Image (cartoon, rainbow, N blue to C red):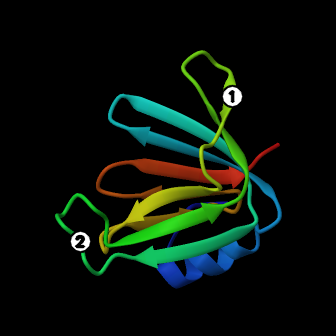
């Protein structure tokens, strides 16, 4: 299936269908690559109306659930909180190819897929 661009509402509607599933979130930021496995229990959003500077995102996608993150030593370590946050801006792009989401922000590219 080819990738299609989504607006935030369509992205959220499709992602909500993955509640209760185990997902993998990959983040590529410059030369840094992170990978987390999350037992997705809820999807929430937060809006930051009182930002101190432009580094703090306007909106945050919150993937709620227990999880673990792959370390530099190729082992997994428990996530410190039950929320994995992805910063969102008005310029963020959302794609879905039928199997995985790609979320492109000014700082990083996130891929969200069902963990096999």
Q: Residues within 10 Å of mark 2 (few under 14, many from 20)?
A: few
Disc 2 from disc 1: Cα separation: 33 Å
Say which element carries label 2: loop
Residue 51 located left or right of residue 72: left
Q: Residue at (49%, 79%) from the top-left corner?
A: 8
Nearer to me, 18 or 80:
80
Give the number of the disc on residue 51: 2
Which residue does the numbered mark 1 point to in the structure image?
A: 76
| Figure quadrant of residue 16 | bottom right
Q: Residues within 10 Å of mark 1 (few under 14, many from 20)?
A: some
For marks 2 and 1, the one nearer the N-term is 2
Residue 57, given in percent of the width and then of the height, sits at 31, 65
Q: Residue at (69%, 28%) from the top-left corner?
A: 76
Say which element carries label 1: strand
Residue 14, given in percent of the width and then of the height, sits at 67, 75
Q: Residue at (68%, 21%) from the top-left corner?
A: 75
Q: Is residue 35 above or below residue 99?
A: above
Residue 101, given in percent of the width and then of the height, sits at 59, 59
């Amino acid at each position: 299936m080819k990738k299609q661009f989504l607006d935030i509402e369509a992205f959220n509607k499709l992602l909500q269908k993955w509640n209760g599933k185990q997902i993998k979130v990959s983040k590529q930021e410059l030369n840094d690559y992170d990978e987390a496995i999350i037992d997705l229990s809820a999807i929430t959003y937060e809006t930051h109306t009182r930002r101190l500077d432009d580094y703090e995102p306007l909106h945050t996608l919150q993937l709620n659930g227990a999880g673990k993150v792959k370390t530099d030593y190729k082992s997994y370590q428990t996530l410190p909180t039950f929320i994995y946050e992805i910063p969102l801006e008005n310029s963020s792009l959302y794609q879905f190819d039928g199997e995985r989401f790609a979320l492109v922000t000014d700082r990083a590219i996130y891929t969200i897929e069902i963990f096999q």
